[in-house]
Amino acid sequence: MTTVNYETDIVAWANEQAWLVRNKKFDLLDFEHIAEEIEDVGKSEQRELASRIAVLLCHLLKWRFQPTHQGASWQATIKTQRERVKRRLNQTPSLKKCLQDSEWLADAWDDARDIAAKETGIPFEKFPEKCIWAIEEILSDCWFPQSFVIN
């Protein structure tokens, strides 16, 4: 049995579990919580990718629907997010399947619409309901959406 409670201090618990593994004290491991933590690592990676994609999509939406506000700052954010998404995909290739998952992408799109609505003052409903670009365009270094002003 472990001496540190998972529910009380997860950092101390994790350190203790690592010590137990390194010292081959397998009979003392908290397997249930270890399994949860391992699963959470994957979920955390997916959440980070979704967050980066949402920020990227938000700026692409702003680029398209607020052409008078286009500038170096938005362009830099788009470039940075593209680079970070690609780096994450290179470091964790299994995340590429997320980009092909229509539900996952729809969630990121809704997050992007929400952020864009808050940042632009354009009502959420005015942005397209579904992603209007292919993932290849979204991640392409030189692609920017054509401008379109919402009335």
Image (spheres, rainbow, N blue to C red):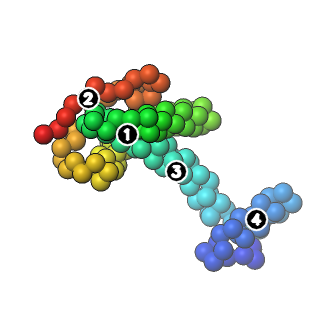
Q: Which residue is mark 2?
A: 147
Between the C-alphas of marks 2 and 4, the distance is 52 Å
How many angstroms separate mark 3 from mark 1 (CA)?
A: 24 Å
The kind of secondary structure element at disc 2 is loop
N-term mark: 2 or 1? 1
Q: Are marks 3 and 1 in contact (CB under 8 Å)?
A: no
Q: Which residue is mark 3?
A: 43
What is the x, y in percent for residue 75? 43, 33
What residue sits 65% from the left and 69% below the top?
Answer: 10
Q: Is residue 116 visible?
A: yes
Calculate the distance from the C-alpha at mark 2 to the C-alpha at mark 3: 35 Å
Quadrant where the image shows the C terminus: top left
The residue at the far left in this view is 151
Q: Which residue corresponds to mark 1?
A: 59
Q: Please, is residue 133 above or below residue 23 in the view?
A: above
Corner quadrant of residue 139? top left
User: How far is disc 3 from disc 4 in space, using C-alphas?
Assistant: 21 Å
Say which residue label 4 marks. 15
Query: Going from the N terminus, do you reach mark 4 or mark 1 first?
Result: 4
Give percent across and percent down for residue 68.
27, 35
Distance between mark 2 and mark 1 Cα atoms: 12 Å
Q: Nearer the viewer, mark 3 or mark 1?
A: 1
